[in-house]
Amino acid sequence: MTTPIRGKAHLLGDDINTDMHCSSKYHPGRDNAYVAQHAFDRLVPGFASRFAKGDVIVAGRNFGNNSSREQAVHILRLMGVAGIVSVAFGRQFFRNCINNGLPVVECDLVGIMEGDEIELDLAGGRVTVVARGIVREVPALPAAVQEILAAGGLIPFLKAHPDWKSA
Amino acid sequence: MGHTIAEKILGAHAGGKPARAGEVVVAAVDFAMLHDARASNALKRIADFGSDKLPFASRTAFVLDHYSPPPNQEAANVHREMRAFAGKHGAVLYDIGDGICHQVLPEGGHFTCGDVVVGTDTHSTTYGAFNAFGTGVEGTDLSAVLMTGKLWFRVPETIRVDLNGKLQPGVWAKDLTLHMLGRLGAEGANYRAIEYAGSAVAAMEIDDRMTLSNHAAELGAKAAILEADAKTTAWLKARGAREPKPVKADADARYFQRFEVDASKLPPQVARKHKVDDVVGVNEVKGQRINYALIGTCTNGRLDDMRQAAAILKGRRVAKGVRMIITPASRNVYLQAAREGLIEVLTQAGASVEAAGCGTCVNITGHLITGDGDVVITSANRNFKGRLGNDNSEIFIGSSATVAASALTGHITDPREIEGGTWRPVPKAA
C-alpha cells in the first residue's frame, strides 16, 4: 500500500521538545516557511539548511515529547521530511504526524549514523541501512494508520472515506 | 485474560467487544471540547475539508478560557470566530468568565461514566475522574470529530496504581500526584493509561479525584481513569448527565505495570523550581521565601481548594510582601465560594480573587508576569522555567493548603503545622 521511503539520515538527540525547536514559539510573528529554515538550529547548528527534501530524521527517545503543537508537523512537512525514526515519540506528536501524513517508525537506532542512506518500509515493518548491514524488523503500522498515511493525512483520508468505519 | 477500563471503553465504542492494548480502533466519541488556544487550527482544518455539515457540533463545547481576557487583537478575534462558529453550528459555548474547560464540562453534565471524551487541551485526562476515557488531542483530531463523531485511537497499555491507606489531614490528592511524578518522572507514563484505585481514592471527594486524573497529564498519560462509586454517580446525576453505567476493570486484566502506594505515610509534597518531577517532602524546602502564592487552574481551583485556603487564612493576613492570587476554576465554583463566605475571608486576608478561567497558570494573558528573582508557590500543574514570563524567577508546586500556609508565613510551610491547615471536607452521605 505504502511504498518504502529512502533518504539520508539526519540525527537528533533524546527528549526533543518540538514546540521549542520547531514552532514559532521562539520565533514570534514568523511564519512556518521561516521556521522551516531554522528548525532545530539551537540543537544542531545548520540542521535545517543541510536537510534536503526526502531526507529522514533519526531522533533519540521521546522525540516530540511534551509538545502538542500541530504546527511542528506542518513545518516538518515544509522541510520535506519524508519520515521520522525514533525509539519512542511524544504521544500527541505521534498522532499529529499520522494526521498530517508524515510517517513515523519506532525502532532501535543503534549503529545508524549521520548521513546514512536509510530505508523505511512501513507496510513490511522493516528499517534498513544497506551500507552497514542493518536490517531491523519493527511492528508494521496498523492498517487503519497506514490508510491515513497513504491518503496524505486524516483530512484527505476523510474526504475519500466519508463513511469512516468503526473497526 | 481480562481487560482494563481503557480497553473496555474503547472497545465498546468501536464495534462492541473489548479492545486490546496496541490495537488501533476507530471509536465513536461521546463529547468533545475545543478551547481557544487551539481553535484556529481546528477551524482551519474544517475549512480545508470544505464541509459545512458538522453533525457533532451539538455535542462539542467551545470554551474561551486560556485567553481570558484576550491579551491582544489576534486572541480577541479567535474569540469572535469561536462565538460565531458555535452559534452557526449549534456548539455549546462557554464564554470568558464561565470557567476552565475541564471544570465546565463535568459541571455541565455533558458526559457520563464509560464515555469517550476528547479535548484539545492536554489536561483532558481530567474526565477520567468520572470513569470516562478522557484524552487530549490536537486540531486535526478535533475537526475530524466535529465532522464524523469518530476518531482513531491506539489502545493504551495501562499502569494500575493502588492508593491504599488514609491520607493524613493536610495531605491531598495533589501531594499524591506530585509523589507519582517524583516516582515515575515527567512523561513516565507516555502512551499509557493509568488506573487509580484503592481505599485512598474511595475516601476522596470528587474535587480531589479530579486533581488525580488531571495531573496525570504531567506523567504523559493518555488517560487516567478511576472506577465509579456512589459518589461519582450521584455527582453526575445531580448535574444532569446521562444515566451512568460504570465500567470496571477485570480482576485478571493485563497491566503494563502495577504497584501500590501507602497514602498514610505521605507528607505534603513540593515540586522544586523548573521541573515537575523534582519532587521532595515539604520539609526539604521549608523556609524557602516566596513572593507569590497562587491558587487556581484546572488542577486545583475547585471549591475544596478555596475551603483549604480559607480555613488557614480566616481572620489572618498573608505575610507582608507576598502577593496572593486566587482564580476559581469556574463561575459555579466562584458563586459557591461567595455563598460560603470564602471570597470575603480570602479578600480580607489580602488575596486578590480573579474571574474564573485559566488565570495564573501560564503567562498567556500577561496579567501576571514575575520579576527577576521572584519565587512563586502555586497549586498549578507546571513549573517550567519562564512559564510566568520571566526566566529569572522560580516556580514551586504544592497543594492549595501548602500554598495558603506559605502565603501566611512568607516562606514554604507545612500546612499541618498551621492552625486550620488540617481542614478536611466532611463527607456527604451519597
Image (tube, coloured by chain):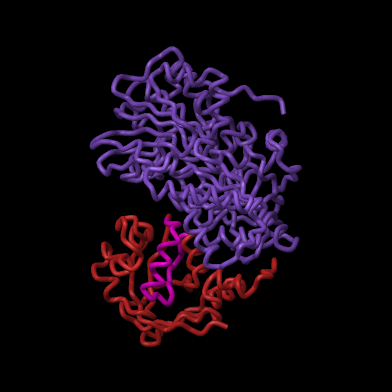
Q: Residue at x 28, y 42 (%)?
A: B390
**Quadrant in which the N terminus of chain B appears:** bottom right
* Residue A94 drawn at (x, y percent): 49, 64
Q: Which residue is drawn at 59% across and 33% down?
A: B165
* Residue B103 drawn at (x, y percent): 56, 39
Residue B239 as seen in the image, left or right of residue B334: right
* Residue B369 drawn at (x, y percent): 31, 38
Farthest top residue in view:
B315
Instruction: Name which quarter of the figure residue A48 lies in.
Output: bottom left
* Res. B1 visible in picture: no
Q: Indicate yes or no whether the magenta region holds residue B25.
A: no
Which residues make up the magenta segment? A67-91
Q: Establish if B204 lies above or below A73.
A: above
Q: Which residue is drawn at 51% across and 48% down?
A: B35
The chain painted red is A
Q: Nearer the viewer, residue B51 or B407?
A: B51
Residue A9 as seen in the image, left or right of residue B111: left
Q: Which of B48 and A91 is in front in this view?
A: B48
Instruction: Name which quarter of the figure residue B392 lies in.
Output: top left
| Number of marks drawn | 0
